[in-house]
Image (spheres, rainbow, N blue to C red):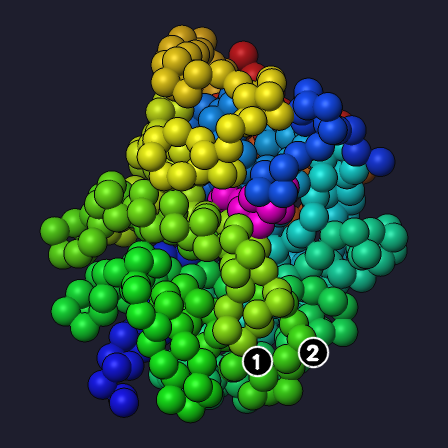
Amino acid sequence: MLASFVFFLVLLLTTSGEVECRSRKKTHDEGTSSSNKKSPSSSLFESKVGVNYGRIADNLPPPNQVLQLLTSATDIRKVKLFDAEPSVLSAFSNTDFSLVVSAPNYMLSDLASDQSKALNWLTSSVASFYPATNITHIAVGNEVFSQTDGALKANLLPAMKNVYSALEKLKLHKRIKVSTPHAMSVLSSSFPPSNGSFSDTTRASLMPPLLQFLNDTGNPFMINVYPFFAYSTSPKSVSLDFVLFRSTKGELDPMSGLSYANMFDAQLDAVHFAMQSLGFDRIPLLVSETGWPSSGDDSETGASVENAREYIRNLVKHVTSTSGTTPVRPSSPTEVYIFALFNEDQKPGPKSERNFGLFQPNGSPVYSSDVLRSGSNGSGTSGAASKSKRRKKRSINPPRQHHHHQKMYRSSASSVRQWCIAKPGADAAALEKGITFACAEGGIDCSPIQSNGSCFDPQIAFSHASFVYNSYFQKMGRNSWNCYFQDTAMITITDPSYGSCRYLST
């Protein structure tokens, strides 16, 4: 019987996990039918399917055009960010979108050390946009327990608790969830799923109190799930049909008696069993990342446009169906965030890392975007006959729409303004050196980042460095070499200004 479980041996793979150390108005026309209500399939799609909007690239459209692309080309109404970028939060205000914002790993030390810093960050980066921008979750850190930095791991739960306490002070803790995404590598065993368990170190000291916090506060356990890596690593042992939701027979877990039709469910249930082994059987799962690359290096077996489209199409069909649950949680449909919205050309690592996107930066789909519509039958057209009637404002011919986006993005590129900001994930000590240089030798007016200054909050190196880096960049003529700072800076085309903190531009 164990022979039928070869596929489970590779369930535990380290994910790609992007670490980007980076009352509300319903203005969208939701239909013109006599009932003026969405169909069940549309509502289920929008409540269960989201997308990760990463920005490790130098050629992406500005947030307002991203909003237009999502609205016209997809039925996705959930977006997950890897930071709390003000320009993005502003662009998505007064829409029918919900957002997950993040506090990147480099912020954990500050958030954990002082509750007032957590409150300052939450006030300026989250509460100031809410509820006009429908922020539903805060992801504190990303895949922290899979890192080697012991201090970072130790700071995670205190940071989460401080963020939650800040939400309580603002009376938002019942409206905005707090959690942290994990890689599948937090598990030491997933064979079979019923034997799922956390790694010894994590299980002994880190995971129990974190699970207790999630359980006590009613927050979800976020997990990044990538069946692609299981298949790509062992294509001779793992069935492609099984990872692409095409299997016609179930794989039996001999210990639980449960049958699995796809690897996605098997991986989720391995996490369910791991939590149950520590006494927590009611914490819901939220899939914070899952996806499939459309291209990869020669060694990355299975990375193709065809497989990427098939995985996303069948994933969406699975989670939005009446059976979109796992064998362990048959009554709990899973909310998933596809990774990722765009191909991001500046992501490091193998070729696949830059090819997980649903769209190219110019707005054209990597593969047929019918998979991003509710009621899709996978044929290239929507399976819902009343789609154009229910969504009159979105009923733009898809081919013509993509054409329009390509033209719009190109025409705006030549006149776009630029700012210089700190790189997400840059070392705090290196950022402090950059700040010292810009404020001293660079001759920049740094009073705005001093106490009582307009850019003093949030009191973190990343924010302060971004402001002075940009001031120096603008003063020196906006040359690329003026935005280097020992490789801790990057150029952006989105205005980093927030609240009363206004970034210079020319």
- Measure how far apart labels 1 and 2 are at the Cα level: 10 Å
Residue 137 at what x, y percent from top left?
67, 52
Residue placed most toward the observer, 285 or 310: 310
Q: Quadrant of the N terminus?
A: bottom left
The stretch drawn in magenta includes residue 312 = no
Residue marked by disc 1: 275
Q: Is residue 365 left or right of residue 178?
A: left
Q: Residue 484 is drawn in which quadrant? A: top left
Number of residues whose C-alpha sits closer than 10 Å to that of mark 1, classed few (under 14), some (14–19) or many (20 or more): many
Q: Amino acid at mark 2?
A: Gln
Specify the amino acid type for callout 1: Met
Magenta residues (range): 43-52
Q: Secondary structure at mark 2?
A: helix
Residue 49, given in percent of the width and then of the height, sits at: 54, 46
Location of the C terminus by quadrant is top right
In front here: 455 or 222? 222
Q: Residue at x 46, y 41 (%)?
A: 54
Circle 2 sits on which residue?
Answer: 212
- Residue 231 showing in the rendered view: yes
Q: Residue at x 60, y 21 (%)?
A: 389
Q: Is residue 98 above or below residue 194?
A: above
Considering only vertical position in the picture, is 505 above or below 492?
above
